[in-house]
Image (cartoon, helix red, strand yellow):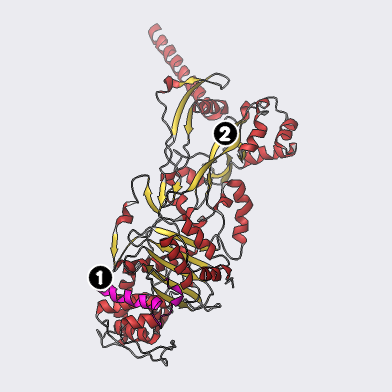
Amino acid sequence: MNLEIRRLVFFILFLSVGVIFTARLFYMQVIDDKWIERAAEVSQKRINIKPPRGVMFDRNGNKVVANKTYYNLMFVENQIKDFDTVAFAKLLEITPSEITERFEAIRSSLDRKTKDRKTGKDTIVNDYRRYLPYAFIKELSSDEIARIAIDLNNFPGFYEEAISMRDYPFPYGANIFGYLNEIRPEELNADRYFYRIGDVIGRAGIERYYEKQLRGQKGTRFIISSARGKMVANFAGGKLDTAAVQGPPLTLGIDIELQGYGELLMQNKLGSIVAIEPSSGEILAMVSSPTFDPNNLVGARNIRKNYNQLVLDSLKPLFPRPIKAEYPPGSIFKVVQALAGLQEGVITENTSFPCTRSMVGCHNHPTAQNIQQAIQFSCNPYFYYQVRRFIQQGKFNNPFKDAAHGLHLWEKYMHSFGLGVKLETDIYGVLAGVIPNVAFYDKWYGKNRWQWSTIRSNSIGQGEVKVTPLQMANLAAIFANGGYFYMPHLVSSIGDDGPLPEFRVKHKTMVDEKHFPAIAEGMRRVVNESGGTARRAKINDITVAGKTGTAQNPHGEDHSVFIAFAPVEEPKIAIAVFIENAGFGGTWAAPIASLMIEKYIKRTVSDKLKEERILNANLLP
């Protein structure tokens, strides 16, 4: 009996101890915030070290994106003691009420919406913790922090933290580089290993596309601290510490001098210039006009000051025209039509068509006796006849089915030239343009209710066709290369590793190389011979091949378009210029392209009168 009682007592005692410990553990982990804070304090002994972002150089070794040191004034609330609000406000040259307001704003900024597990209703949770560091004032310059640093010791819990921010030695290329901005909650949740609250992340351009390379690798430092939170020593003598590694430098294909020159030429004009090195696909310049100094969006203070002004500007300086503006290509599209026609055998190099102006308006020129002259004179009726042969090849007796068959084939050719598809470049936000297909017209007109005569405006780059300036420049690179292109890209090397592998792949069109010399000759005549539509693009000692376009604009003056490559013998640059509301392509776009070509190849410009005319022109609508 005594044994049974002993067993019962022992069991009750054992059960009681278990219940007490379980209850105590539950209280510590769930109910008492003090233990949550204590656990967090322990975790703070692991310090993450952020490296500076990788810098960028242009193709000639000029540093175009650098880092500059700024400072955050940090605080940890549970370390603040005997705080004199009036004295601190005087030090910062603000009012005591602003001190209070700033503390409140920091706390409320960490509110987040979540769902209550029991009720399913939205509730607000605040992630502010008294033991964590927060920025009281961000992005102080060296002079600003120096003014307050000498008295900062009088305010326990406050300290300075050096941060790295971007600096642009050249005030060009804002649409290329992008900018940095504070990380959003969803981005933070996606990668909590690297980022913390208040970190910045690439928001656009190269900064966004190459974020993972530019941010580098964070380091870790483990420390032993005293009961008062002061560092005593490195944990394990620093054996567990890892060094932060700066992101690799990026070498760009951009020529910053050429970029700046292009932005200068495009002042008081709306539009784009895109220049590409045909042999590599590297983008030499990508001008979006109007533009702005990239330094205007460095740091939260500048962004708050300048971003809304840029958004509200009616000329849309934040809109990246080279990749997002979709325009009718106009007569530059005739070159692609000619190549597709030659490949399909619906024309030969010596095919001639009458210049039937009753079919469509045209310039005063002799009848084109061959494809070279058709390009030289930019004969509209010629390409109406040629594309009709392509679309209506007589494969079917039913003209509607025949047109659908021809258009499907035509679409495939256009896609092979990078039209109607997104160019898989290292730029975010690239649009595909529009190459209308069978489904497009079936939806618009109805199945078996359209044929070539319905869609004939596409023959000369009007109608429903739309392309971006980047695609136009890529066309010029294809003509320069004789039938292939490398995907246009901005970064030519990540560290010493070269570009991303996808930018080393040669993309061939559906047109054989043998058809391109005749096209190049026609484009050479456009610039260099009588009757050509781009005589203002001629350069005395550089042979330029090009094609003008005048893109019809239902909302105002026509757009001025020109694409070119040079030198014809060994192309080093392919270029597209698009000027909104500027009229005939040979008047404005062509001379701008020639100035850019000469500037890149010779590093100077010989025709100062041409340059002065462009610089003084105000073509804003």
**Residue for point 34% across, 87% down:** 368
Residue 189: x and y in percent read 47, 43
**Which label sits in the foreground, 2 or 1?**
1
As rendered, which of 594 and 190 lies closer to the eye?
A: 594
| Residue type at numbered disc 1 | Glu
Q: Residue at x 44, y 36 (%)?
A: 218
Task: Give the amino acid type for the residue marked by disc 2 in the picture.
Answer: Glu
In magenta, the rendered stretch is: 510-539
Q: Which label sits on residue 513?
A: 1
Q: Which secondary structure lies at badge 1?
A: helix
Measure how far apart labels 2 and 1 are at the Cα level: 60 Å
Establish if 238 lies above or below 575: above
Q: Earlier in the sequence, mark 2 or mark 1?
A: 2
Label 2 crowd (10 A; few <14 / some 14-19 / many >=20): some
**Nearer the observer, 289 or 567:** 567
On screen, 554 above or below 140?
A: below
Query: What percent of the width, then of the height, locates residue 516?
Result: 29, 73
Q: Secondary structure at mark 2?
A: strand
